[in-house]
Image (tube, helix red, strand yellow):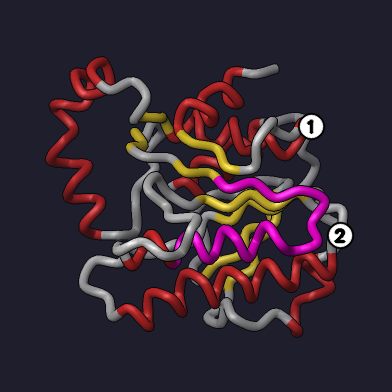
Amino acid sequence: MVGQAVLRECLLDPDIAAVVAVGRSASPVEHSKLRQIVRADLFHYADVEAELSGFDACFFCLGVSSAGMPEAEYERLTYTLTLAAAGTLARLNPTMTFIYVSGAGTDSSERGRVHWARVKGRTENALLRLPFKAAYMFRPAGIRPMHGERSKTALYRVAYNLSKPALPLLVRLFPNYFLTTEEVGRAMIQVARRGAPKQILETPDIRARARSR
């Protein structure tokens, strides 16, 4: 869902010349400055390295829910997959800014009781050690889809549909918990363009970046 949002904002931004979207399935979006790389294997990139060079930023939005998933598989799809892509990009694009969509509650100590939070924290820490020009970890909490974006996770889609009538009230009651997909996408572009005062951005930090000019 976040990937759909940042793609929309990238295509609307006149200063962004070209976008390459990498994933297991093609986006229905068509645009003159968008090129898509569809591949089943997101752990190895040797055959497409030439297509992944020369970029200023990477917005890494891939992720899975840990609900009902064996711990080893969650680690493989969260830590191993992310570092496979990021390691390749760091080698090919040393001046790149890398932005990783993590989540509220991530455990930077890697020692907490919650497995998913430890794995996310381990992933963040490893990314921050890679030789990018800069790396930033986005930790959004609740995200409201604004332009038809839909999560690929069935559990999330059900949760969004059930909570939709109450969302306006929840946003008023908990303004530091909710962001829109538009805010997340714009914030990612702004951070890639101008940086941020901290490497780990929570919901209020993301909103501030989205509103910055």
Kind of residue indicated by mark 1: Asp
- Taking 185 as reference, is 29 above or below it? below
Residue at position x 28%, y 80% in the image: 70
Quarter of the image where one finds residue 174: top left
* Rendered location of residue 110, percent (x, y): 46, 64
Q: Nearer the viewer, mark 1 or mark 2?
A: 2
Quarter of the image where one finds residue 94: bottom right
Instruction: Using the image, tell me which numbered label, if any, was put on residue 94.
Output: 2
Q: Nearer the viewer, residue 30 or 23?
A: 23
Residue at position x 77%, y 31% in the image: 194
Kind of residue indicated by mark 2: Pro
Q: Nearer the viewer, residue 75 or 129?
A: 129
- Is 56 situated left or right of 206 in this image? right
Magenta residue check for 177? no
Q: Nearer the viewer, residue 197 or 111?
A: 111
- Taking 5 as reference, is 49 above or below it? below
Indicate which disc, 1 or 2, sits on the residue closer to the N terminus: 1
Which part of the image, by quadrant, shows the C terminus?
top right
Instruction: Using the image, tell me which numbered label, if any, was put on residue 197.
Output: none
Residue at position x 63%, y 58% in the image: 21
Q: Is label 1 in a helix, a strand or a loop?
A: loop
* Rendered location of residue 169, percent (x, y): 19, 18
Which residues are drawn in magenta? 119-137
- Is 18 situated left or right of 210 in this image? right
Magenta residue check for 121? yes
Residue at the spot of label 1: 15
From mark 1 to mark 2, how far is it between C-alphas?
21 Å
| Disc 1: CA contacts within 10 A as few (<14), some (14-19) or many (>=20) | few
